[in-house]
Structure formats: C-alpha cells, structure tokens
Image (cartoon, rainbow, N blue to C red):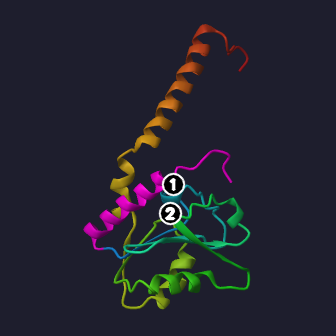
Amino acid sequence: MTAFPVDESLHLDRIDRLRRAMVEQRVDVVLVSVGLDMPYLIGYQAMPLERLTMLIVPLEARATLVIPRLEAPRVNMMPSVFDIVAWDETEDPVRITADIVRRHKPSNIAVGYQMWAMFLVELLPMMVDVRYSRAVDVMGSLRMRKDVAEIEALHAAGAAVDRIAAKLQSGEIPLIGR
C-alpha cells in the first residue's frame, strides 16, 4: 500500500478518457495485467507473478480488478474507480475474468501487450466469437498526453536532478574515488 493519498478523480478521468478512446476504436472491453497501463489507470503496480492479476475495463460499466487474495492488501482501494474480486488458490482466475467479461457481451477485446501468454491462451477458448486487438492501440495516445499529476511529478524529478547536479558541480558531493 502507498503512504500517500490517492486522487481518485485523477484515475476516474483516465478511465473516462480510455472509454472515449474505446468508442473511437470500437473496443468493448480492455484487459490489462502486468506492465504500466494498470498503474496508469488505477495506481496499482501488479507483481509479475504466475498468478493472474487483471484489470477489466468495460465500455459501459465499472472497472474490476481480479487479483489474488494474497495481493489484495497491497491495493489502494478506490471504490469510485474500480471494484475488486479477490480469488483464492483453489479458484480459476481466468474463468473468473472470462465470466466478468462475458457479462458485457463484447465483440472486440483489447488486450495489454504484457499479459502473460498463458493467461491469454486459457482465455481464448472461453471467449468465442470475439475479436482481439492490442490495448496499446487504445491506451498509447492517452499515455502520451500528460495530465497535471504527471507534469507535477516530472517537474519534481527535474528539480531533484538539478539539486544533485548543483551539489556535484559545487564539489559538495565529492567524486574522487567514486
């Protein structure tokens, strides 16, 4: 869990922008797993484990995070942004994901490019008569445009580098022997 407050409106705005892009791309559901899209959308960095963590973003319903129960405590809960379905070791998380996705009757699903192939291969026969596309085609343009929080983080990072560079140049941080 993070030690700083979470701005739910930031994540709501990002998901809203994703949905507008989904309409343009004729995508009904976006599935993202490990990688950078999930933290961008909901602020959670999925651990790259053999256990499935999947964010399901349907066009016209709440997003759902399917996550191993042992990982769920790491998530900053944002009830206005997404629901959580925590699964136990004896459950099939791919089937849980497919059941949630099927409720939205999708014809086109965009899949995050860093989803483990084993999960996609298991999902394919559960979701027949569906066209699959790349989530990067929907998400890519959104992540290029920086929002206020991202711009502030970039300014803070730049200022930190400037402070370090000034200390290096002034000799305050010795470089001899390093």
Q: Reply above or below: 49 against 175.
A: below
Q: Residues within 10 Å of mark 1 (few under 14, many from 20)?
A: some
Look at label 1 and name its amino acid. Glu
Q: Quadrant of residue 161?
A: top right
Q: Position of residue 17 (x, y in %)?
A: 35, 59
- The reply, left or right, for residue 117 in relation to residue 128 is right
Residue under label 1: 8
Q: Quadrant of residue 47?
A: bottom right
Q: Position of residue 40 (x, y in %)?
A: 49, 54
Q: What predominant SS class does the magenta segment belong to? A: helix
Q: Quadrant of residue 23?
A: bottom left
Residue under label 2: 81
Q: Which residues are magenta?
A: 1-26
Q: Position of residue 19 (x, y in %)?
A: 35, 66
Quarter in which the C terminus is drawn = top right
Q: Residue furthest left?
A: 24
Which residue is rendered at x = 73% and y = 80% of the image?
89
Q: Reply above or below: 20 against 100.
A: above
Look at label 2 and name its amino acid. Val
Q: Position of residue 148 (x, y in %)?
A: 42, 41
Which residue is rendered at x = 47% and y = 55% of the image?
11
Give me the C-alpha separation between circle 1 and circle 2: 7 Å
Circles 1 and 2: CB atoms closer than 8 Å:
yes
Q: Residues within 10 Å of mark 2 (few under 14, many from 20)?
A: some
